[in-house]
């Protein structure tokens, strides 16, 4: 596959982040007193998180707000549906790899129905017909076969992850359907998907800023909790810790339960809405 310079650069950043995680894991970085055992190199992760958050605040968020202001809601929904329909191919591949025959058949039926009757996926007739959308990716497939998650890492530009999910994201980059289109088309699709995904999480950004006293810890625990929820097949019930207060009442904000991402057509690989940093959009955009 003839990768664009942008895609090669993103893959390089991703490889660097995974390499750092493996290096730290092998070196046996110790967790500090009171630290999260899943996050043994919190200091480095916090620094990377701060850089990602700054880029998101200065660049991605203004663009996403402009997109929401200019583009009508019904058009934004069609854009989300289009990329979600493309992403169903990756979801189906992972359902097959995990031996989920029924889910894979539903994925195939969703793609066929939405592609044919939904004008290339612009309209989501499959959901209205009762075909559920599944949430699978290569990181979950590795976890399904017992590959340990490894330490929590924050990858530059891509955001929250762990070593297993980072490897899964690298695999997704290799097989992403968008990557097989002509460079000019591929670049436009990547940018539109990134902006659309980021715009979808603007509300979560505001919620995180208002509710969390420590955005880094809240984001980390929301990410890990949501990934475990998906790995368990949506059966986890343990709530996440409380990290903030209700700005309106002063009372503690309710703990965030690792539930599926609400809203229309989340891209495969997209993280919990409590993780709205630029990395969430980048990961989701590359997951198509």
Image (tube, rainbow, N blue to C red):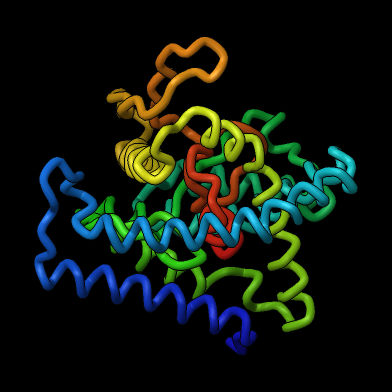
Q: Is residue 211 above or below residue 58?
A: above
Figure quadrant of the C terminus: bottom right
**Horizontal placement of 39 versus 90: left or right?**
left
Above/below status of 180 relative to 249: below
Position in image of residue 242 (x %, y %) = 34, 25
Which residue occupies 39% across, 38% down? 214
Q: Residue at x 62, y 87 (%)?
A: 5
Q: Residue at x 79, y 55 (%)?
A: 120
- Viewer-nearest residue: 91 or 221: 221
The percent position of residue 145, horizontal first and vertical second, equals: 23, 55
Nearer-the-camera pick, 64 or 186: 64
The answer to whether residue 164 is visible is no
Q: Is residue 27 left or right of residue 175?
A: left
Report the side of 114 relative to 285 (left or right).
right
Q: How many marks?
A: 0
Q: Quadrant of the N terminus?
A: bottom right
Q: Nearer the viewer, residue 138 or 58?
A: 58
Percent x, y of residue 201: 63, 42
Image location (x, y in percent) of residue 149: 24, 55
Quadrant of the image occupied by residue 137: bottom left
Q: Can I make out residue 3 in this image?
A: yes
Rendered residue at 74%/67% (across/down): 189
148, above or below 179, in the image: above
């Amino acid at each position: 596959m003839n990768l664009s310079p942008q895609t090669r650069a993103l893959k390089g950043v991703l490889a660097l982040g995974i390499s750092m995680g493996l290096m730290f894991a092998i070196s046996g970085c110790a967790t500090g007193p009171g630290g999260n055992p899943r996050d043994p190199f919190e200091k480095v992760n916090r620094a990377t998180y701060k850089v990602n958050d700054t880029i998101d605040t200065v660049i991605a968020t203004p663009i996403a707000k402009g997109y929401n202001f200019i583009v009508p809601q019904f058009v934004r929904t069609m854009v989300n549906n289009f990329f979600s329909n493309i992403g169903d191919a990756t979801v189906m591949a992972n359902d097959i790899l995990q031996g989920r025959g029924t889910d894979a058949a539903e994925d195939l039926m969703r793609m066929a129905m939405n592609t044919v009757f939904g004008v290339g996926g612009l309209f989501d007739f499959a959901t209205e017909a009762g075909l559920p959308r599944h949430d699978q990716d290569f990181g979950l497939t590795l976890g399904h076969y017992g590959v340990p998650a490894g330490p929590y890492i924050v990858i530059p530009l891509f955001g929250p992850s762990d070593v297993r999910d980072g490897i899964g994201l690298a695999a997704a980059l290799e097989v992403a359907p968008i990557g097989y289109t002509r460079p000019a088309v591929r670049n436009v699709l990547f940018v539109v998907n990134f902006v659309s995904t980021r715009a979808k999480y603007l509300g979560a950004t505001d919620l995180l800023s208002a509710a969390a006293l420590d955005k880094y810890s809240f984001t980390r625990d929301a990410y890990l909790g949501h990934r475990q929820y998906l790995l368990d097949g949506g059966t986890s019930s343990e709530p996440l810790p409380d990290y903030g207060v209700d700005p309106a009442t002063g009372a503690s904000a309710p703990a965030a339960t690792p539930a599926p991402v609400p809203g229309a057509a989340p891209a495969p690989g997209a993280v919990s809405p409590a993780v709205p940093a630029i990395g969430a959009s980048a990961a989701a955009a590359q997951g198509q």
